[in-house]
Amino acid sequence: MTIFQERRNRLRNLMSQMSVDAYLITNRFNIYYLSGYTGDDGVVLVTEQSAYIITDSRFEEQIKTENPDIDAIITRDYLGEALNVVAKENCVALAFESTLDYESFDYLDENASSDVVALTKVIEKMRAVKDEDEISTIRKACQLSRKGYEHILTKVHAGVTEKEMALELDYYLRKNGAAEASFETIFASGDRTALPHATYSDKKIAEGELVTCDFGYYFNHYTSDITRTFVVGKASDEIRKIYDIVRVAKEKTIEAIKAGISSKELDEIGRGYIKEQGYGEYFTHGMGHGIGLDIHELPNISYSYPDVLEAGEIVTIEPGIYIPGLGGVRIEDDILVTEKGYENLTNFKQDLIEISN
């Protein structure tokens, strides 16, 4: 039995508990998770009896070699064929993902022979806990990211643009095994580092400026996600102070990670320390999130989420301080949750780096 068949069987057990006997999957990450299908068009239908990739003729030959453990239906009428299967197998309740667009929902609601019901994050919760192969792959993605970061430190200097450095990083990572970026790389300098999601621009990096580098790249379908902040030239005393506060907040949060702790508790540890140091108002986002097939997965690490961490989850911890007119500091690591603690998959270059020309 393949890993994809095992996952579909786990899903069927959950479906049975929810009195659902058919499940239409449209999210591309969930499609891959359940089938291994990498085509960019199509849906997956899982029933009590069978499972199908429903797509068009462009992917027919691909499925024969890539997905031999699942049936294929070749058509342009994805939803219509899904409903034909539901009727043929006498399904009583067809579930769909709550992110489905309204037009598709309306079609299902009008034409299904069964009841239709929206389900939220059922497969995403399955994806949150990684198996050993997934953990190994993400570990390799993190190792590649480390090499990419170390490479960029040898290239950055006053006078280069943010865009040039982001493209240099992209080229290096793709050349050395990465597939693509899981989000647009953030390579921000100077006062632009006060923008948590500044991406990159044609701005030239100047002597004495902060630089924030936040990136994630896919390796065998799974992504890493790291952030480092450094200085081109010498850091001011204020920058050093802020950097150390963020670093300690991150370390305190990571040291508390283990199976059974809640996301809210973790957030409170790091956020509380930043507040104690007088910078609470400048930490404006959550403490972290899960990673895997997607850059943002469950669990969310935030004061507004009661989720309890489980062994096998991989989460980011990424506190930051962002001061308009001065700049921002964020440091982010990828952490594997274990029964008794954690493993830091990106534990490198934590101290403030000052790059001299």
Image (tube, rainbow, N blue to C red):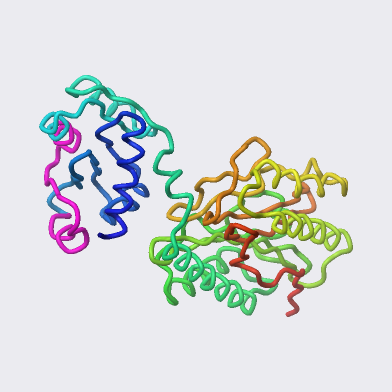
The x and y percentages for residue 194 are: 72, 50
Question: Which residue is painted at 28% across and 36% down in the image?
Answer: 23
Above or below, comparing residue 202 to residue 283 in the picture = below
Of residues 354 and 70, the one nearer the viewer is 70
Taking the image as shown, residue 288 lies to the left or right of residue 42, namely right
Above or below, comparing residue 39 to residue 113 in the picture = below
The x and y percentages for residue 93 are: 26, 26
Above or below, comparing residue 251 to residue 28 in the picture = below
Question: Which residue is painted at 21% across and 19% down in the image?
Answer: 110
Q: Quadrant of residue 137?
A: bottom left
Taking the image as shown, residue 73 lies to the left or right of residue 134, namely left
Q: Is residue 248 visible?
A: yes
Question: Which residue is painted at 25% across and 22% down in the image?
Answer: 115
The x and y percentages for residue 77 are: 15, 37
Residue 187 lies in magenta, yes or no? no
In this view, which residue lies farthest toward the top?
Answer: 110
Of residues 95 and 32, the one nearer the viewer is 95
The x and y percentages for residue 149 are: 60, 72
Residue 72 lies in magenta, yes or no? yes
Range covered by the magenta-colored residues: 59-83
Give the position of the N terminus as an image quadrant: bottom left
Of residues 137 and 312, the one nearer the viewer is 312
Give the position of the C terminus as an image quadrant: bottom right
Q: Is residue 201 visible?
A: no
